[in-house]
Amino acid sequence: MHGITSVTSIRKKFQHAKPVDREDFPVRGPGGPIIRCYTPGNMTPTSLTNDPQTLTAPGPAAPTTGLAISGLSGDYTLEITVQALSATSGTPLARVVLEDTVNGFTNAIPVFEINVEGPITTPVTYLMRDDEVPALRIGVTNAALRLNVYDLEGTSPSITVHGAIWQ
């Protein structure tokens, strides 16, 4: 696991750091807070989309064939960045999904999904570590990963998105 489950162990390991207050972190279960690092650290991003990718209707972002992930292995972080979301009237809404496949997206499986409400004018990034997305078929023969906008609502909606896998 990538999470550290004890505030005491953090204080011992990083004695020079500012003390951690339990209220600063969400509590999950009887063991106390689970603290996760959501930054990709020393990883390098590989883009899933031709940037910038702007869509005005639901559908996959280019390239629609996705990124081959069959040759990848090890730790990874998935990223979805919504750079802009707008509509000429009404509230713009979008459902953005990273999906994987082993058969050319005939039966794609969603592995990371976000629902966003706009308008968005400043980029918002969502990251998901490998232990939070264990179903991704990384390293599996013929596996590919792509970004797909499943829903896009509002009057004349527009979304500008970016997807990446960090390794």
Image (cartoon, rainbow, N blue to C red):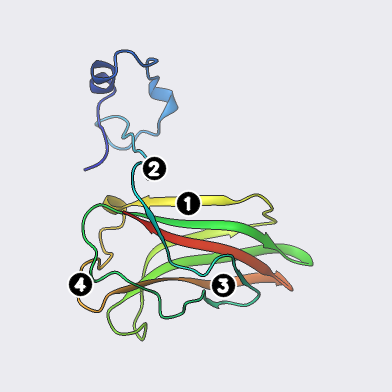
Could you tell whether 134 is left or right of 146 in the image? left
> Mark number for residue 38?
2
Residues at marks 4 and 1 touching, judged by CB atoms closer than 8 Å? no
Left or right of residue 122: residue 63: left
Q: Considering depth in this image, is 127 or 30 the residue closer to the camera?
A: 127
Q: Residue at x 43, y 60 (%)?
A: 164
Q: Quadrant of the N terminus?
A: top left
Tell me which numbered mark, 4 or 1, is placed earlier along the sequence.
1
Furthest residue to the right? 89
Q: Which of the two labelled residues, at mark 2 and mark 4, occupies the earlier sequence position?
A: 2
Q: Amino acid at mark 3?
A: Asp
Please report whichever mark, 2 or 1, sits nearer to the chain's N-terminal start. 2
Q: CA distance from mark 3 to mark 1?
A: 18 Å
Q: Position of residue 150 (x, y in %)?
A: 52, 73
Q: Are marks 2 and 4 in contact (CB under 8 Å)?
A: no
Kindly identify which residue carries mark 4: 140
- Residue occupied by mark 1: 126
| Gap between marks 2 and 3 measured at Cα | 26 Å
Q: Which residue is drawn at the image coordinates 52% and 62% (left, top)?
A: 162
Q: Earlier in the sequence, mark 3 or mark 4?
A: 4
Q: Identify the residue at horizontal 24%, vertical 20% (top origin).
A: 13
Q: Nearer the viewer, mark 4 or mark 1?
A: 4
